[in-house]
């Protein structure tokens, strides 16, 4: 008997006490084995009242990203079938890379309550406090050339935007390439890390960070003006599990579409969420910095810019800051 079976019985008793005897008969185990599992579930944070004498009443599940909770009602064929969960980890991307190297299949997920060395692009840090966000990495083995990886990160951005839109009823903006923002403040970032040899992708780790339940004071002072969370936006504390489930379902849907039919469909959906085009932007690309007007998303996922002298320039992998009227920067680097 596993905890999942006993949980299913407790949750299925719909607000009524259920006796230890009844559970033990249903599962074909002793009453003391049931009691042991109940204690284990309580240790995991489940609210279950009662005792072997009175029977048990299931009251609430903790808001923790337990794999068996994510898998309940998860509408995917491959993504999230195997989930590794950590209370605390350096970086879920690092763990997923190690698993990718060991041959774990596409769709394997690593999720943590807290990251102590969460990372962004170009060795930047990603603030990942305990139990307040979704810090998740996914192993992919896409059948495409490494040069198409930037498109996959845009595809992931579209899936994240659709997931938040569906869960909150609020439409996020996508800042090129794939920051999700509300009113110019960042709520989600994506980091793709690639392991490739000789023009062939071995595996790709897609890391996604979503700020869910932080209040403004939970962010360090240097992020308070540029970052936001779903709680700040909606005014209420949200459960993270349904968001993770929706995210995995839409990631699988968008990724499968991309693998079967290419980038064109996701590009259209990206355009429907984007907040970069038509704006004056400041771009950092390598050591270079320049200003231009963002005019289009190219078919390969690059950003097309009109330069002050009227020429067009393509930006494949830079950092973009939107400029407000009057030249001020919005959102920040
Ligand atoms: C990103 O980088 O936006 C990618 C973030 C990916 C995080 C996930 S969490 C799961 C997985 N495991 C990891 O270790 N990473 C991935 P970038 O575009 O470089 O943005 C980083 C910048 O965003 C930082 O320099 C800060 O200015 C800002 N920042 C850091 N933490 C933030 C947060 N929680 N919310 C909003 N902004 C943040």
Image (spheres, rainbow, N blue to C red):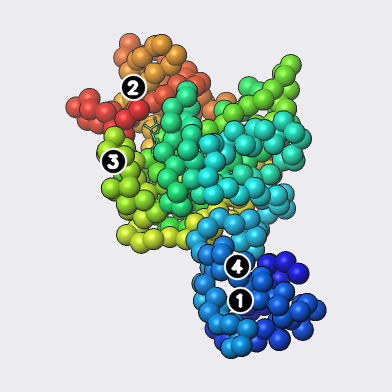
Residue at the spot of label 2:
282
Q: Quadrant of residue 282?
A: top left
Q: CA distance from mark 4 to mark 3?
A: 37 Å
Viewer-side label of 3, 2: 3
**Point 78% across, 77% down: residue:** 29
Among numbered discs 4 and 1, the one appearing first in the sequence = 1
Of residues 72 and 182, the one drawn nearer to the viewer in this rendering: 72
Residue at the spot of label 3:
224
Indicate the position of residue 46 as horizontal and vertical percent values. Answer: 54, 68
Residue at the spot of label 1:
11
Q: Quadrant of residue 228?
A: top left
Q: Is mark 3 within 8 Å of ligand 1?
A: no
**Point 71% across, 77% down: residue:** 32
Residue at the spot of label 4:
41
Of residues 316 and 189, the one drawn nearer to the viewer in this rendering: 189
Among numbered discs 3 and 1, the one appearing first in the sequence = 1
């Amino acid at each position: 008997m596993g905890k999942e079976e006993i949980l299913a019985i407790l949750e299925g008793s719909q607000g009524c006490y259920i006796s230890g005897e009844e559970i033990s008969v249903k599962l074909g185990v002793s009453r003391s084995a049931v009691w042991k599992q109940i204690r284990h579930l309580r240790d995991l944070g489940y609210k279950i009242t009662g005792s072997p004498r009175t029977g048990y009443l299931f009251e609430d599940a903790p808001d923790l990203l337990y794999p068996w909770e994510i898998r309940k009602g998860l509408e995917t064929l491959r993504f999230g079938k195997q989930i590794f969960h950590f209370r605390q980890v350096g970086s879920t991307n690092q763990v997923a890379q190690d698993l990718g190297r060991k041959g774990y299949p596409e769709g394997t997920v690593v999720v943590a309550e807290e990251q102590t060395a969460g990372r962004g692009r170009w060795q930047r840090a990603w603030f990942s406090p305990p139990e307040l966000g979704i810090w998740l990495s996914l192993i992919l083995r896409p059948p495409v050339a490494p040069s198409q990886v930037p498109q996959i990160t845009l595809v992931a951005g579209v899936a994240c935007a659709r997931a938040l839109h569906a869960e909150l009823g609020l439409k996020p903006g996508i800042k090129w390439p794939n920051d999700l923002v509300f009113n110019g403040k960042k709520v989600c970032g994506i980091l793709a890390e690639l392991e490739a040899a000789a023009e062939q992708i071995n595996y790709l780790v897609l890391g996604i960070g979503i700020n869910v339940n932080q209040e403004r004071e939970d962010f360090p002072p240097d992020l308070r003006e540029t970052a936001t969370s779903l709680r700040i936006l909606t005014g209420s504390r949200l459960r993270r599990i349904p968001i993770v489930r929706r995210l995995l379902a839409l990631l699988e849907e968008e990724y499968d579409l991309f693998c079967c039919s290419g980038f064109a469909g996701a590009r259209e959906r990206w355009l429907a969420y984007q907040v970069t085009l038509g704006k004056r932007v400041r771009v950092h690309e390598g050591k270079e910095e320049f200003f231009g007007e963002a005019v289009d998303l190219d078919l390969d996922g690059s950003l097309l810019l009109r330069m002050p002298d009227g020429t067009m320039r393509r930006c494949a992998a830079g950092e973009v800051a939107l400029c407000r009227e009057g030249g001020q920067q919005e959102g920040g680097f």
